Image (spheres, grey):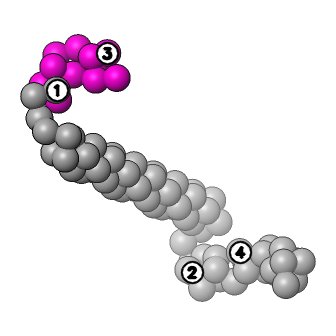
Amino acid sequence: MFYSLGSKGILLDRISSSSKVVVVVVVVVVVVVVVVVVVVFVVVVIVVVVVVAVVVMTGFKSLTLVSLWLSSMQHLEPVIFVLF
């Protein structure tokens, strides 16, 4: 399996089997953390862009975060009632 990785496979073959497990676990944890951070960053950027677009379209005075939250809750009420 490690030979297919080329030079990295040769390097991994020199490491003991217990160290290989540690290296694989560390790599998997790092990849998962990076993916989660990227997903959270993308979601935050999308939310900020949507809020800014709504504020710009409706005017700054007519929109507050409370009214935006309440309007989103009104759309979610049927879904919540169906779930429960």
Quarter of the view holding residue 59:
bottom right
Circle 4 sits on which residue?
Answer: 72
The residue lying at 19 percent from left, 47 percent from top is: 18
The reply to whether residue 27 is visible in this rendering is: no
* C-alpha span from label 1 to label 4: 55 Å
Residue 3 drawn in magenta: yes
Q: Residue at x 27, y 16 (%)?
A: 3
- Tell me the distance, in whole angstroms, between the alpha carbons under discs 2 and 3: 57 Å
The question of residue 2 being in magenta is answered with yes
> What residue is pinned by disc 3?
4
> Tag 1, which secondary structure?
helix
Measure the alpha-carbon separation of dots 3 and 4.
51 Å
Report how far apart the C-alphas of labels 2 and 4 lie in the structure: 12 Å
Label 3 element class? helix
Q: Residue at x 25, y 46 (%)?
A: 21
Looking at the picture, how far across and down is residue 24, in whole percent?
Answer: 27, 43
